[in-house]
Image: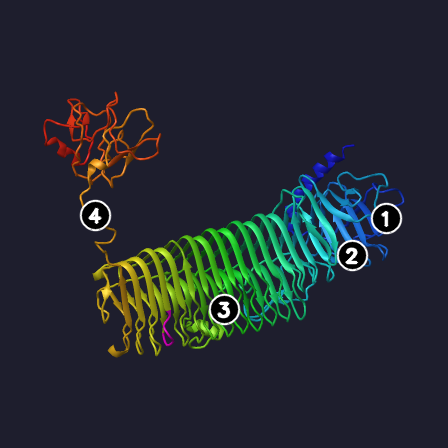
């Protein structure tokens, strides 16, 4: 039998033809259906086919609640249909294709009752734009080799059984081959509309195009690579499964919504691509799961769960071993492509979870969870082992930004956002964060990037690249927590909590193990910024978001913990409020702060109370080139308070770098500095062109306070009182050390000595004890030890373990004696000697030792 060879040739032929078939919109001319039974099932139980192009399929092998069909070919032309005429009580229909051809389906597949339908073709399955389903149960299309059952039976399409070994047990998995065929689907894109982009929920149309299963059922495509170009998959309140698997078994189990799949026994995955406004829709609290290697959604393609009324929960989950790439919006610019969870009712929205190595949202694509009602928006969780990118905006509609975040537009709260990865890059107006437009609370945002976070630049409409927690309404913003090694905000990038309305801005906490670097402005002069603020929105934003003329909410508090903080080139760090509210408190704990070239640390208000600044700097605070630390109030509020604890504070007097706690119309604030030294900057009652420390008020009577606590050097600290009586050295030094008695040599002087008599005096020994000691016995011969000046030496016998003040008989060995001078030989060797004929030579003991080549 040459079936394998025939299958291979047919497989190649079919794939060569596939491109032209898809390009011509599959079967544009009426042709006969190719639904042909094979002879692998027992006689009398084989599939029976009648009619054309509308095919009716009878017969099959019945085992309990399962019905088995087997075909050599299975294709449906445009306008055609395949009708499985099964008994009403059949629970599962298992159909396989054993020939070598791909299944081209551009018509209707239907079945009786509520039976689940499995279509198995290892060669590949192609769904055209007119493909549709009319079945009462779940639909599973797969290019696996076989369906595995609980009793170890395999219903195989590559090795079909000719004996009646069928089963009544339940299916437990899909066994993938080594090179499973591809599943492709074409369509004309989704049928969606929106009244006002962003502010209005999506409206799902009445189109029945694409593959659709009844409410609460499963629609699954499990195969090799999966390519959906404009196709739509719908499983309301049910489950959509896209699995691209290269080998192993995909486990399945029965659930209330049909079937659940897991991939724990699979090691290699293929690629999944959705393009041309493709749609996977499991609205009504359903579940969408995507498993692949490289997963991409382009051209406004969406995975969507929208909950209305009392519908609740659900989840969108994407597991991509290599990457998930979201790119672009719809061609008309009205729809954001990507992963989209919405709640319009009173219950919570679906959660969104991504697990991958690399995640990128580009050109207006997004991962978003929104609440348009009283229900809470879903949570967003991203686990990316390597990197996360949010880059750019839609070229068609620049107001559509690349986003990872959630939002609330009414009374419901926004969900939380958690992103964990090695590196985060946000460019050209990209955004990660949470925002509330209504009375609901904003979600908390937690970002963990173990290597670095970089925010650079802005969009063409002046939207900064940001990590944010924002309120535009009456609801309070959430908290923003950033954990990383290195945080960089550059050329307009920002990390911020903001209020533009009456709600309070959330708190911001930054923990950076290496550094925080904030520098520069955008091309449109938007400064880079890390902090909390209440700015006055532009007229465009006021009109677009229905904002008040001035915000009334309070700014949040900011805490920064890092070894090094750098602020330069017009960038700033701090808390500010341009509305009627108060600024928060800025707390920084660091080893060093450098503020340069118009950089600033601020706690400023226009009309409210000035904010507070608390800086704890272990080493130094450096202010250069018109930089500043300010806690000021511009309206009726008092100036803020500045507390600085630093090793030293350094500025250049002529560079006009200031520390200010001023108020324009009320009392000045306070400045308290505790430092070891302050250089180049000083207190003055008014600001000058020099580097100043000020706390001015509306008048001299309303000036604030400046307190400088500088640690002065005490020349008497650390000194040791000298004895008032002269020590009798004869009672401190023994007259001899007997050899070979296990004695010890103890140095008790304060300096000028080597550790042992055998070691040289170090070159950096700049102090020596010049007191002369009376030596009882003088030695004429040279000492054998080098550097053996024995100022303050005691000898202790190990035999008695107590000090003796006695003289020992002279040992045959040469005893160690006090050096009285040095001698230099003709070869350059230096010897310490007990006596010297030239008394001036001993002065060399007090000179620094250097080694020069002779």
Give the magenta-colored segment's residue range: 606-611
165, 663: nearer the viewer? 663
Quarter of the picture containing the C terminus is top left
Residue 722: image tag: 4
The crowd level at tag 1 (other Cα within 10 Å; few <14, some 14-19, many 20+) is few
In the picture of the structure, the residue carrying the numbered disc 1 is: 63
Mark with earlier residue (4, 3): 3
Q: Nearer the viewer, mark 1 or mark 2?
A: 1
Instruction: Check residue 789 for magenta coloring.
Output: no
Give how far apart the Cα atoms at labels 1 and 4 are.
108 Å
The crowd level at tag 2 (other Cα within 10 Å; few <14, some 14-19, many 20+) is some
Mark with earlier residue (1, 2): 1
Give how far apart the Cα atoms at labels 4 and 3 are.
67 Å
Secondary structure state at the residue bearing disc 2:
strand
Secondary structure state at the residue bearing disc 4:
loop
Mark with earlier residue (1, 4): 1
């Amino acid at each position: 039998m040459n079936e394998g060879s025939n299958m291979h040739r047919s497989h190649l032929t079919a794939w060569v033809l596939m491109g032209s078939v898809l390009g011509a919109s599959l079967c544009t001319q009426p042709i006969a259906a190719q639904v042909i039974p094979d002879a692998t099932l027992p006689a009398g139980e084989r599939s029976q086919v009648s009619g054309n192009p509308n095919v009716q399929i009878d017969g099959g092998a019945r085992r309990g609640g399962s019905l088995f069909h087997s075909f050599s070919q299975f294709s449906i032309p445009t306008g055609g249909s395949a009708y499985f005429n099964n008994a009403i009580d059949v629970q599962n229909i298992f159909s396989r294709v054993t020939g070598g051809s791909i299944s081209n389906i551009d018509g209707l597949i239907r079945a009786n009752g509520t039976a689940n339908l499995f279509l198995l073709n290892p060669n590949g399955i192609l769904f055209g734009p007119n493909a549709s389903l009319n079945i009462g149960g779940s639909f599973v299309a797969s290019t696996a080799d076989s369906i595995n059952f609980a009793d170890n039976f395999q219903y195989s399409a590559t090795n079909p059984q000719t004996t009646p070994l069928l089963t009544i047990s339940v299916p437990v998995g899909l066994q993938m081959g080594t090179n499973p065929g591809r599943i492709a689907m074409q369509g004309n894109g989704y049928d969606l509309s929106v009244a006002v982009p962003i502010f209005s929920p999506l409206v799902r149309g009445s189109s029945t195009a694409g593959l659709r299963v009844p409410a609460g059922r499963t629609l699954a495509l499990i195969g090799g690579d999966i390519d959906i170009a404009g196709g739509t998959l719908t499983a309301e309140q049910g489950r959509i499964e896209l699995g691209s698997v290269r080998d192993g078994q995909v486990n399945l189990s029965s659930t209330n919504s049909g079937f659940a799949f897991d991939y724990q026994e699979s090691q290699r995955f293929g690629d999944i691509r959705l393009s041309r406004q493709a749609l996977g829709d499991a609205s009504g609290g359903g579940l969408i799961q995507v498993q692949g290697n490289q997963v991409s959604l382009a051209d406004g393609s969406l995975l969507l769960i929208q909950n209305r009324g009392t519908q609740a929960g659900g989840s969108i989950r994407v597991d991509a071993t290599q990457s998930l790439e979201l790119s672009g919006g719809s061609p008309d610019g009205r729809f954001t492509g990507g992963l989209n969870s919405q709640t319009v009712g009173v219950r919570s929205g679906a959660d969104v979870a991504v697990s991958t190595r690399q995640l990128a949202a580009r050109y207006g694509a997004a991962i978003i969870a929104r609440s348009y009602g009283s229900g809470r928006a879903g949570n967003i969780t991203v686990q990316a082992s390597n990197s996360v990118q949010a880059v750019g905006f839609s070229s068609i509609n620049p107001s559509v930004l690349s986003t990872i975040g959630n939002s609330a537009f009414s009374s419901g709260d926004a969900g939380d956002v958690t992103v964990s990865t090695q590196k985060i890059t946000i460019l050209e107006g990209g955004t990660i964060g949470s925002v509330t437009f209504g009375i609901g609370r904003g979600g908390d945002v937690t970002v963990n990037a173990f290597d670095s976070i970089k925010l650079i630049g802005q969009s063409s409409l002046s939207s900064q690249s940001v990590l944010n927690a924002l309120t535009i309404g009456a609801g309070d913003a959430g908290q923003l927590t950033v954990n990383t090694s290195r945080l960089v905000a550059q050329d307009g990038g920002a990390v911020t909590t903001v209020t533009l309305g009456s709600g309070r801005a959330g708190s911001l906490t930054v923990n950076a193990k290496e550094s925080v670097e904030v520098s520069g402005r955008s091309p449109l002069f938007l400064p880079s910024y890390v902090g909390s603020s209440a700015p006055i929105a532009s007229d465009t934003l006021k009109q677009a978001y229905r904002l008040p003329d001035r915000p009334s909410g309070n700014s949040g508090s900011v805490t920064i913990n890092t070894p090094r903080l750098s602020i330069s080139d017009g960038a700033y760090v701090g808390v500010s409020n341009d509305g009627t509210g108060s600024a928060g408190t800025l707390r920084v704990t660091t080893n060093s702060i450098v503020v340069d070239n118009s950089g600033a640390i601020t706690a400023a208000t226009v009309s409210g109370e000035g904010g507070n600044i608390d800086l704890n700097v272990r080493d130094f605070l450096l202010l250069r080139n018109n930089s500043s630390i300010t806690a000021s109030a511009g309206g009726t509020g008092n100036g803020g308070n500045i507390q600085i604890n630093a090793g030293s504070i350094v500025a250049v007097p002529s560079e006009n770098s200031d520390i200010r706690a001023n108020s324009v119309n009320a009392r000045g604030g306070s400045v308290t500095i505790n430092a070891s030294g302050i250089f180049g900057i000083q207190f003055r009652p008014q600001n000058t062109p020099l580097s100043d420390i000020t706390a001015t008020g509306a008048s001299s009577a309303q000036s604030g306070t400046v307190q400088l606590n500088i640690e002065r050097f005490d020349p008497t600290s650390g000194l040791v009182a000298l004895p008032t009586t002269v020590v009798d050295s004869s009672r401190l030094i023994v007259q001899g050390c007997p050899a070979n008695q296990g004695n010890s040599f103890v140095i008790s002087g304060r300096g000028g000595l080597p550790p042992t008599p055998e070691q040289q005096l170090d070159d950096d020994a700049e102090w020596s004890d010049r007191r002369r000691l009376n030596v009882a016995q003088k030695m004429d011969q040279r000492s054998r030890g080098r550097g053996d000046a024995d100022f303050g030496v005691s000898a202790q016998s190990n035999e008695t373990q107590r000090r003796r003040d006695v003289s020992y008989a002279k040992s045959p060995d040469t005893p160690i004696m006090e050096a009285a001078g040095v001698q230099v030989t003709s070869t350059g060797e230096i010897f310490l000697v007990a006596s010297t004929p030239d008394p001036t030579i001993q002065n060399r003991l007090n000179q620094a030792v250097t080694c020069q080549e002779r």
